[in-house]
């Protein structure tokens, strides 16, 4: 099956920044189910948390990234 298209663009101070990604259907469905089961999460928070965690795990030293990782761990 072709990957689902996930548009996580969000109005921002710099409108030139957006993200569009194709993800495998199984991953897309997992994300959809997670968001349905956790109403305090939305696609923007999920993608931000996942991206920050990836960057942190791969050696990013930026304090802003570290803060996003901590926010993802301790917010409900």
Image (spheres, rainbow, N blue to C red):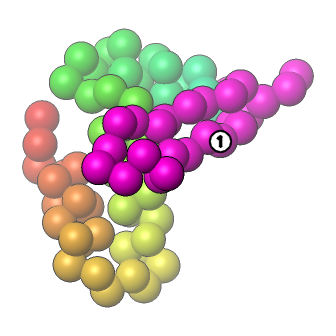
> Vertically, is 52 above or below 36?
below
Q: Which quadrant of the rendered structure holds the N terminus?
A: top right
The foreground one among 20 and 41 is 20
Where's residue 46, x and y in %? 37, 39
Q: Residue at x 20, y 78 (%)?
A: 63
Pointer 1: residues within 10 angstroms few (<14), some, or many (20+)? few
Q: Is residue 28 left or right of residue 60?
A: right
> Vertically, is 24 above or below 37?
below
Q: Is residue 64 left or right of residue 53?
A: left
Q: Is residue 7 magenta?
A: yes
Where's residue 47, x and y in %? 43, 44
Numbered disc 1: secondary structure: strand
Magenta residue span: 1-26
The foreground one among 67 and 19 is 19
Q: Is residue 17 magenta?
A: yes
Q: Is residue 26 left or right of residue 33?
A: right
Q: Residue at x 44, y 71 (%)?
A: 55
The residue lying furthest to the right in this view is 1
């Amino acid at each position: 099956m072709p990957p689902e298209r996930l548009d996580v663009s969000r109005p921002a101070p710099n409108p030139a920044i957006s993200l569009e990604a194709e993800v495998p259907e199984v991953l897309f469905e997992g994300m959809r189910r997670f968001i349905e089961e956790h109403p305090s999460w939305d696609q923007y928070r999920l993608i931000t948390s996942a991206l920050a965690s990836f960057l942190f795990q791969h050696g990013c030293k930026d304090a802003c990234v570290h803060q996003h990782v901590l926010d993802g761990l301790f917010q409900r």
